[in-house]
Amino acid sequence: MPDDRSLDHQIASGDPIDRSDGTPSYDRPAVLRSAGAYAQLLTRGPARARIALAAGVLCCLGLAAAAQGARGDGSADAIPAAAPSALAERAEPDPASRDSERVPVSASASASPTRAADPDTTTPAPKPTTRKPVDPAPVAGLDKAQMKNAQAIVRTGRKMEMPRRALVIAVATAMQESNLYNVASGVLPESRNYPHQGIGWDHDSVGLFQQRSSSGWGEVGQLMDPEFATRQFLSALAQVPGWQQMRLTDAAQAVQISAYPEHYAKHEWRATTVVGAILEAGQ
């Protein structure tokens, strides 16, 4: 049995533990071979020597493992150490993005510059507007009441699709007959039961055209209505042959059968002015 060596005894260079074959310490096969030699020594040497050698073997193995991990040469042992770092890189966003403002997709899309929308395709087409009729200001020396009555004549004539000339003849006739006021009759108390703007005394003549119910123009209440009275006058005018080519006073006289046939002519220019103003106002 060999003599036990003390811990303080220096091992000779020829002893197996000091033998070196020139293999780098981080080479795992060399480390394993050295470990086999150490194991033989551990089983054959004294107890204290075996303890010391075991501690040295463990230290060498730890250093070899540390050197193997630090090498990072792509071997299988290097992957576990590198994997957590790689996973962390994949999980973490780009650090620069943390300084940028996070914007929802919808808001970001709306904020991005885009081509201006084509107004012809995106803007609703404007709805056609109709010109709203307005009451024209009185012209040709008329007051508001007279102008309202003239408007009623023009409006009714247009509904009947009568030409402009017929409207001028009708207004001029009303100017002569009633001064463009809706007049009741002092002879017919019934006529005063309807809205009126004065009272006349020419027999039973009433309204704008001083038409007589006794002559078949209509009922008193009807003749006091400016629109009805206008329809009666224009309907009669349309029955006069060639009225379009007649002088205004002759066309009016053919309907009215007045004792003063030439008096209608003096109102022609005023009637023309009034009708023009009303038509321009969109009546």
Image (cartoon, rainbow, N blue to C red):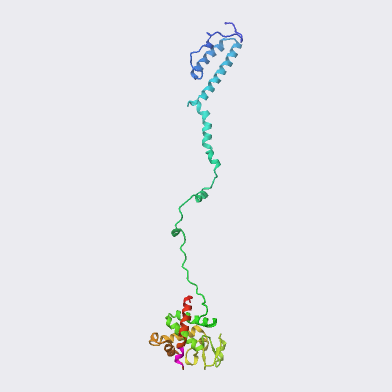
Say which of 31 and 44 sits in front. Answer: 31
Could you say where residue 13 lies in the image, as x and y percent from the top left? Answer: 53, 9
Q: Position of residue 261 (x, y in %)?
A: 44, 91
Left or right of 58 in this view: 239: left
Asked if residue 282 lies in the magenta stretch, the reply is: no
Q: In the rendering, at what x and y percent does residue 230 appear?
A: 47, 84
Give above or below for 8 relative to 255.
Answer: above
Q: Is residue 257 visible?
A: no
What segment is highlighted magenta in the picture?
A: 260-264
Q: How many marks?
A: 0
Give the vertical position of 258 relative to 54 (above or below): below
Q: Position of residue 279 (x, y in %)?
A: 46, 77
Residue appearing at x 55%, y 20% in the figure: 63
Q: Nearer the viewer, residue 212 or 97?
A: 97
* 268, above or below 72, in the image: below
Q: Mostly what secondary structure, the magenta segment?
A: helix
Q: Can residue 164 be seen?
A: yes
Position of the N terminus, as image quadrant, is top right
Residue lying at 57% horizontally and 16% vertically, measured from the top left: 56
Which residue occupies 51% across, 31% down? 83
Of 72 and 149, nearer the camera is: 149
**Residue 6 placement, left or right of 80:** right
Q: In the picture shown, does residue 216 fall above or below 107? A: below
Q: Residue at x 51, y 36 (%)?
A: 90
Residue 55 shown left or right of residue 165 in the figure = right
